[in-house]
Structure formats: structure tokens, C-alpha cells
Image (cartoon, helix red, strand yellow):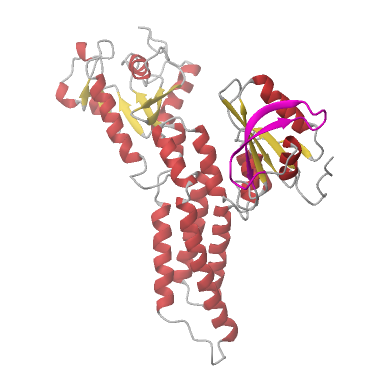
Amino acid sequence: MPAAPPANNPATIFALSSGAPPAGVAVVRISGPAAGETLDRLTGRARPEARRAVLRTLTDPTDGHALDRALLLWLPGPASATGEDMAELHLHGGRAVTASVLGSLARLPGLRPAEPGEFTRRAFENGRIDLNEAEALADLLAAETESQRRNAMMLAGGALSRALEDWQGRVLAMSARLEAEIDFSDEDDVAPLDPGFAAELAALAGEVARWRGRVPVERLRDGIRVVLAGPPNAGKSTLLNALAGREAAIVTPIAGTTRDLIEAPVSVGGIPFLLIDTAGLHEGSGDAVEAIGIDRATQAMMAADLLLWLGDPAEAPAGAIRVGAQADRLGRDPAAYDLLLSARTGEGLDELIALLVECARVLLPAEGEAALSARQRIALDRLGDALELGRTERDPILIAEALRLARVAIDALTGRAGTEDMLDGLFGRFCIGK
């Protein structure tokens, strides 16, 4: 029997990392100091050559019964996904086979089932990935549209991390030069700061400023917010149902049927949208519930990425798309609208969808750009502000302090200065086995 790992070593964890059985193949991952010894015990033989798949019979170490004939991979650390010794068991994907192997692993001393996201958390803690790559991996697992997948792949591939590594090296180099100037300015072999120092700081601030202008990732995660607004009985709920392709909102000829926000997520052309129907806007009837609905409608209009106005075009808010709904019985001048449609007959619906997609592309990241999370945008703002402070100061001590603040902001971006609560929240988003 193998000895339990020393107390100062992390536990060896295991989990099913593929989909729930039954399946063609079930992949079980093992990570930690006892991974190699566990592989030896399951096969009764010396572990295979590193990173070479071999076919072996697995047996239960406690009773010697055969479990499965499987492909095995031995992945010694630190050159593994978690930075630790790892093993992968590629099993036949039946429920009984998977349950038997997992049960055998659970009975071995020093092993325990992994918590959700624990493999990825170990990769982060062992320096295999930074916090931005971990967040991107969580987004990739949750991606439902093509645009979400592309953005997650870009960040998981290190788009922001590579920039941060470059910035960190430059900030550290500038800090070292400045500290030498401050501490040893009276020494003959320490050169004073040259005019190129300010230019270098300005160039770095400019690069960070370009990243600060990136699109928020919430538009990709939650969808472009498309708010349908206008007076009662303008056709908002009918249009929402037509765009959503289902009866998401109740439609009646009674004014004020919609009293609260009704949300319908859809994906069009690989772009996520969140359609929001609102209560009809009017002077009010003294109904308290109706007043709340109108107030929520007003707030939704203010937070909209795209606003579809289904009312008098002369009353349309600035920037709204003026939709002549109910075109089959429109009484106003058609030229006053941006688009005419009838949700009942389908007239103009394709044109509206094409317009929404066209407008959405402007709000989403351009080709080769990545959208950023709120955490990343806040930390980038702090980094940019620190660099701008360094540019405006003349006192070397204050410039040095600005560069220290810049280093802190970079550490926050990479997660090296993160809090446990924030890390728990992130890695809890992952499934078990990831």
C-alpha cells in the first residue's frame, strides 16, 4: 500500500473529466504527488513512458479484480496541465466501468475526489496559467455563441497575458533604473535618467490606453441588450415574440398587458442578443403597479445597447431605431421611420434582423481584439491611471511610487495579488474534473 503524501504536499485528486456516461470514452484525470504511484498500482507494472499513450489492463488494487482495458497517459510535472504529476485514464465509457474505476481510486489512501474547478485552480496556483487565462477557460466552457467562443479562445490563448508579461518587464526595468537614480545619484557609475525614460513611459501608457478602450465582455456573455419601447398597444410584445421565435410575451388587445420587463435571449448569426419588452409608456392612470412598470421601462431604455422605438417617430429618443410596426395599418408617413415591418405577416422582419446584426457588430470586438471583464477593466484603469500619474510627475520619488502602483495593478490583473474569496468565486464556476 502506498503511503499517504506528506502533510505539506497537496492531496492527489481525481475526477471524471469527460461528459457523463454512457459515452464512447470516459477520461479520468489524476493530479498530485501520488499520481504516478497510483498508475503503477492500477496496472501492477511500471508506469509508461512520459506522454506516450499505452494500452494496459486496470485492476482494483484492493482485490485484484480487472476493471477495464484502457489507454493510459503519464504526464509528469511541472510540464503538465496542472503543473503537478498527472495521469489520464481513457476508459470505455459505460456507467459501470466509470463507477468502478472512480470507486477504486476513492479507496486508495492519499486520494480524494476533486472539487469543482480544482484542476484549473492548481494550474493557476502552480503558474501554468494566470487569472485571465483561467477566466477565459471558464467563459469557453460556458460559451453558447460563436462570438463568445472566439473571445474566450483569444484570452485563453494568452492575448492579454502576453501583453501583461511585456508590460510587467518594462515597468520593472523602469522602476530599477529610477530606484538606482534615487538611491545612488551621487555615484559616478549610475547614469542619470535620460529623456528617453519619459518617452518609454508615455509609450507604455499609450498601449495600456488602447486596451482600456476594449469592449466589455458582458455584451458577449449576456447579449446585446435590445430594448423594445413605445406607447401601449404599439406591437412591442408581438415583435418580441416574432424575433424570439416563441411566445415569450403575452399579447392581447388590452392596453397595459405588459407591466414588467420581459427578457428573451436569442442568438442570431453567432451573436447573442437579449431582447427586452417593456411596459407601454404613457402619462399613467394612477395604477401603482403600472407606474412601477413604466419606471422600469425608462431605466431599461437608458441601459439599452440598441433601442427599438415603436411609437411616434417624432417622440423617439436620440439614437433609437424608429420602427414602423404594424405596417399593414400604419397611419403615419412611412418616410419618418427607419424601418417598416409587420410582425404578424413577417414583412420587414428579415430587414430588422439584418439591421440588428449590423449594429451589433459595431458594439462587439473587432477582428483580433478581445472583450474584457469588469475585473480586468477596473485593474486596467488603475494601471493606466498609475502610468499617467508617472508621466505628469517630475519628482523621481513620486514617479517611483506611480510605478509601484502600476506593478500592483498588473499583479491584480494576473491574479498574483488576488483574494481568496475572488478566487473561490472564479474556480467555483468550473465543473468537477476541470
Q: Quadrant of residue 321?
A: top left
Q: Position of residue 12 (x, y in %)?
A: 74, 42
- Can residue 144 be seen at all in this image of the molecule? yes
Residue span colored magenta: 48-75
Residue at 51% from the left image edge and 37% from the top image edge: 139
136 lies left or right of 256: right
Q: Foreground: 21 or 279?
A: 21
Looking at the picture, tell me which residue is in the foreground, 414 or 124. Answer: 124
Which quarter shows the N terminus? Answer: top right
Q: Is residue 220 left or right of residue 71?
A: left
Task: Residue 318: tell me if it is visible.
Answer: no
Image position of 361 with respect to 188: above or below: above
Asked if residue 383 lies in the magenta stretch, the reply is: no
Q: Residue 315, position in %: x, y?
A: 27, 27
- Residue 66 on the magenta span: yes
Q: Residue 267 is drawn in which quadrant?
A: top left
Total number of numbered discs in the rendering? 0
Quarter where residue 61 is shown: top right
Q: Residue at x 55, y 58 (%)?
A: 409
The answer to whether residue 392 is above or below residue 154 is below
Screen quadrant of the C terminus = top right
Q: Residue at x 28, y 21 (%)?
A: 311
Residue furthest bottom as drawn: 188
Left or right: residue 400 compared with residue 229: right
Task: Name the spot of residue 203 as percent of width and height, x first.
Answer: 39, 67
Estimate the x, y position of residue 5 in percent, counting from the top left. Answer: 80, 47
Most extreme residue toward the top is 253
- Foreground of the two, 224 or 369: 369
